Every structure is written in structure tokens, then in C-alpha cells.
């Protein structure tokens, strides 16, 4: 049981380049999330998907797009990377419930130069 | 929306000492969760508190939910080097989305 799998684990981009971060979960969870983690800022929600076909903006959505391809997969796209998007990105999933826990992927360490 | 504030941001602890980290909200929370992230790792769920005044223990870790359900604490006794990491509190809103605190980074000195 792999849980939440993110690819790639590391990535270096040049300013202006685009890329897609992939996330897949095998726990049959409806809810999926993308967070970014910066020093001293905790985990900030970028986008959220409560179910296949639905997505909602989180706290810091600017510069990102998402796609909920199916129940398992939730991708995050940077169309034109900027140095301010250098961060560690985490995908997470959970059951749709008020009292539930989040399961996180291993993270993607992205550097934009 | 609800926000959860964590203090302190950093905690340096001598091995064997106790410490407490706090999580506060201006609104009543439906629940509070605690996660631990080891250096270079990802957040891992530790525990969830739901009831007013609830106290739960995991070995040397004691978690408490305030009577008004607006604050929570994590107390670690006899700190060990394995306790190193960042501890996050989180609350879920009515839509099931998680709101995380900024975390308390714990450094343990042998």
C-alpha cells in the first residue's frame, strides 16, 4: 500500500519554465490537496479538490493551476515558474469528513533559478 | 475563515527536559489534530482531539484540547533526540479542509 505518491522528488527550473507536479493516492480518498511549505510559514493550501471534477482555490493559488484527472490523481501545474515559487510542495489526501486525518506524500523540493 | 496560531515558532530543549507547544484559535474548533514532521520528511498524523477538555497520551506526549475548544497543547516529557522535528496543529473546517498552524520547530541538545 503506497499511500500518497508524488513525483518528482526534486526539480530545478529556470524562471519562466513550466512543469507539472504529479500526485496519486491509492486509499480511495475523495479529498486531495496541494500545499507549499516555506520556512516559518507552515503549510499553506494552494488548491483543494473535494471530489473528481471539482477544485477550489486555497490560500495561495496565484501562479498555479490544478487538474483532478480522476479519483486517484491530482496534478499541480506551474505555467511560468518564478523564484518566489521555490518551495517544498506536498500533496495530501483524506476522507471527506469533519473528523479525518490527512495523509501526505513525500514532497517535491522545487528550486526556481 | 478560522486560523490556528502556534507558539513558540522555535523550541530549543535540553535532552531530558520537558516542553510544551501551544495552538490557539479565535474561533471554536470542531477538532484539533497534531502532526509531526521529521527533518527532510513529510507531516505524519499523531492524534486528533474532538471533545471539550479532552486529554490524550502517547507515551511521553500529552495532548490537550481546551474547555472552550479554542486552544490545544502538546506537552513532551523527558525529551529525547528522536523528538526532533516540527510539530503542527491543524483544524478542519466545515468543508473538511485542513487549516495548519505555522508549526513549532524543536531542536534537542544532547
Image (cartoon, rainbow, N blue to C red):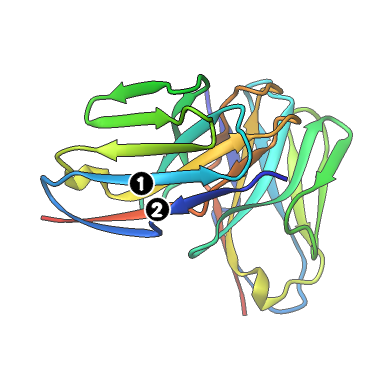
The residue depicted at 48 percent of the width and 24 percent of the height is: B49
Relative to A25, B42 lies left or right? left
Tell which residue pokes out farthest to the front in this image. B68
**Does residue A18 appear anywhere in the picture?**
yes
- The answer to which quarter of the image holds residue B14 is bottom left
Reading the image, the residue beneath label 2 is: B104
Nearer to me, B21 or B80? B21
Q: Chain letter of disc 1?
A: B
Q: What's the residue at 12%, 50% (across, down)? A: B15
Give me the residue at 22% from left, 31% from top.
Answer: B60
Q: Is residue A11 in sight in this rendering?
A: no
Query: Mark 1 sits on what residue?
Result: B21
Tell me: A73 left or right of A38.
Answer: right
Residue A64 placement (x, y as % from top left)? 79, 59
Quarter that holds the C terminus of chain A: bottom right
Name the mark on residue A110. none
Expressed as whole percent of the image width and height from the top left, the position of residue B80 reads: 17, 43
| Secondary-structure class at tag 1 | strand
Amino acid at each position: 500500500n503506497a499511500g500518497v505518491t508524488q513525483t518528482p522528488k526534486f526539480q530545478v527550473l529556470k524562471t519562466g519554465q513550466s512543469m507539472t507536479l504529479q500526485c496519486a493516492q491509492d486509499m480511495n480518498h475523495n479529498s486531495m490537496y496541494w500545499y507549499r511549505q516555506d520556512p516559518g510559514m507552515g503549510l499553506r493550501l494552494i488548491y483543494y479538490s473535494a471530489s473528481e471534477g471539482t477544485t477550489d482555490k486555497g490560500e495561495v493559488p496565484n501562479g498555479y493551476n490544478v487538474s483532478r484527472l480522476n479519483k486517484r490523481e491530482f496534478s499541480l501545474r506551474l505555467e511560468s515558474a518564478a523564484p518566489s515559487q521555490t518551495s517544498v510542495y506536498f500533496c495530501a489526501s483524506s476522507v471527506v469528513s469533519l473528523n479525518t486525518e490527512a495523509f501526505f506524500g513525500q514532497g517535491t523540493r522545487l528550486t526556481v533559478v | 475563515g478560522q486560523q490556528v496560531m502556534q507558539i513558540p515558532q522555535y523550541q530549543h530543549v535540553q535532552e531530558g527536559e520537558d516542553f510544551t507547544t501551544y495552538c490557539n484559535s479565535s474561533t471554536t474548533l470542531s477538532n484539533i489534530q497534531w502532526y509531526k514532521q521529521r527533518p527532510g520528511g513529510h507531516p505524519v498524523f499523531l492524534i486528533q482531539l474532538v471533545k471539550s477538555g479532552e486529554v490524550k497520551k502517547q507515551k511521553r506526549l500529552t495532548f490537550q484540547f481546551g474547555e472552550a475548544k479554542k486552544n490545544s497543547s502538546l506537552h513532551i516529557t523527558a525529551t529525547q533526540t528522536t523528538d526532533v522535528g516540527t510539530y503542527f496543529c491543524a483544524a478542519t473546517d466545515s468543508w473538511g479542509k485542513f487549516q495548519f498552524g505555522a508549526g513549532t520547530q524543536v531542536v534537542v541538545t544532547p
